[in-house]
Amino acid sequence: MACRRGDDDLFVNQYATGKNTAIVLDPEANTTSKPKVTFKEYMVQKKRHLHAGKYYRSEDKQKIGFFSLSHALFWLSGLGLLIYFGIEQSWEQFFIVFGIILLRSVIVVRIFASASKKIQGTKAPKNSWMHDFLYLGYFWVLGTISHQAKDIQWK
């Protein structure tokens, strides 16, 4: 499989196994790339990256799909229940749901903080819980656009 610039994830997805691949947490092992400057360039890049997911192994597509579905169900049902219990003034249930959302948000912040420290040696953004919520729209909107795109251009 010949890799064009930008589809290295397809190469890794096809050939990586538990026997020939390892996770390296040393900050010296990180690679960096220059971020896109304009919103248009960013969108073209994201469409290309997400479009490549069509070619992942079925097992990996299922894992990504399950994660995305569970993520969406958590936030949509959680927010829906908060609104419902708030309107009904069922404050005990409202605070139980709010507590579950808060607990998950604290766990997400701690995971990002731990991973960021191990991988980059820096602190994760304090609002990573908000990024987790915003990822809901980001992934579903961009994922849908990218999946349906027919005009993907590789450099």
Image (spheres, rainbow, N blue to C red):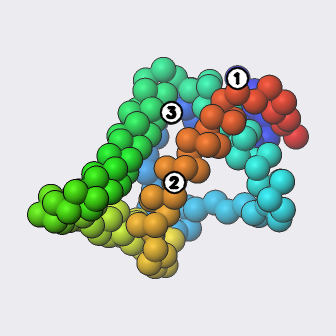
Mark 1 to mark 3 CA distance (whole Å): 13 Å
Residue with the mark numbered 1: 1
Q: Dot 2, crowdedness within 10 Å: few (<14), some or many (≥20)? A: some
Q: Dot 1, crowdedness within 10 Å: few (<14), some or many (≥20)? A: few
Secondary element under disc 3, as helix, strand or loop, is loop
Q: Dot 3, crowdedness within 10 Å: few (<14), some or many (≥20)? A: few
Question: What amino acid is at disc 1?
Answer: Met
Left or right: 111 in relation to 93:
right
Mark toward the start of the polypeptide (1 vs 3): 1
Mark 2 to mark 3 CA distance (whole Å): 26 Å
- Do callouts 1 and 3 mark residues in contact (Cβ within 8 Å)? no
Image coordinates of residue 136 in percent, x first then y, are 49, 50
Question: What amino acid is at disc 3?
Answer: Ala
Mark 1 to mark 2 CA distance (whole Å): 31 Å
Q: Residue at x 50, y 33 (%)?
A: 16
Quick check: 29 above or below 60?
Answer: below
Looking at the picture, tell me which residue is in the foreground, 13 or 103. 103
Left or right: 103 in relation to 57:
left
Residue with the mark numbered 2: 135
Image coordinates of residue 89 in percent, x first then y, are 20, 62
For the N terminus, which image quadrant?
Answer: top right
Image coordinates of residue 93 in percent, x first then y, are 15, 58
Question: What amino acid is at disc 2?
Answer: Tyr
Residue with the mark numbered 3: 16
Looking at the picture, tell me which residue is in the foreground, 145 or 47. 145
Looking at the picture, tell me which residue is in the foreground, 69 or 121. 69
- Closest to the camera, between mark 1 and mark 2, is 2
